[in-house]
Amino acid sequence: MSIGVWIVLAVVAIVIMIAGARSVKTPAELSPQAEPVPEVEIDEDLEPFVEWLILEASEQTGMAVHADEDAVARIVEAALKAREALATQPTYHLSIPFLMSDSSDPKHFELDISKEDLQEHL
C-alpha cells in the first residue's frame, strides 16, 4: 500500500475514535432513575439507598456504574453490610476496591455513610 492510503486509513481511524469519545456520557449526564438497574436482587426497601450509592459511585469513578451488573451486585452487597453496621454504629466506611476499570486505571469506590444518610435514602 502507498503512503497515501495509510494516511487516509489513519485519518479515518482518528475520526472514528473521536466520534466514539463524544458518545460517552459524563457522570452529570447519567441518571440512575432513567436507566434500569440490571437484574440483581435488591430488597425493595433498600432500593433507593442502592440507587443513591450507584449515583455516588458513578460520580466518583466517572463511569456508568449502573450498566455493569457485577459492579451493581457489589454495591448491593456493600449496601446490605452498611445497613447492618449502621444499626449498631453511627457511621460506616464503605470501601469497594476495583469496582470497575477503564483503559487508564482501576476505579475504586469509597464513601463514609452516616445513619442520617441511610435514613435519608431509604
Image (tube, rainbow, N blue to C red):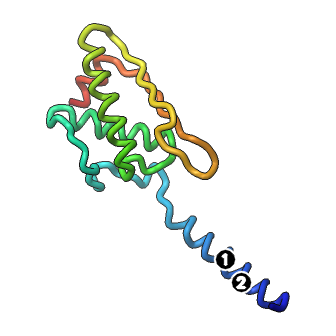
Front position in the image: 98 or 122 = 98
- From the image, tell me which residue sits under label 1: 13
Circle 2 crowding by C-alpha within 10 Å: few under 14, some 14–19, many from 20? few
* Quadrant for the C terminus in the image: top left
Circle 1 crowding by C-alpha within 10 Å: few under 14, some 14–19, many from 20? few
* Quadrant for the N terminus in the image: bottom right
The answer to whether residue 14 is above or below residue 49 is below
The answer to whether residue 110 is above or below residue 16 is above
Circle number at residue 9 = 2
Q: Is residue 62 left or right of residue 69?
A: right
Q: Secondary structure at mark 2?
A: helix
Q: Secondary structure at mark 1?
A: helix
The amino acid beneath tag 2 is Leu
Residue at the farthest front position: 1
Q: CA distance from mark 2 to mark 1?
A: 6 Å
Front position in the image: 99 or 91 = 99
Q: Which residue is found at the position 40% from the left and 52% from the top?
A: 30
Q: Which residue is found at the position 29% from the left and 40% from the top?
A: 51
Q: Position of residue 116 (x, y in %)?
A: 28, 19
The amino acid beneath tag 1 is Ala
Q: Position of residue 28 (x, y in %)?
A: 44, 50
Q: Which residue is found at the position 36% from the left and 40% from the top?
A: 54
Q: Are the residues tagged 2 and 1 within 8 Å (C-beta)?
A: yes
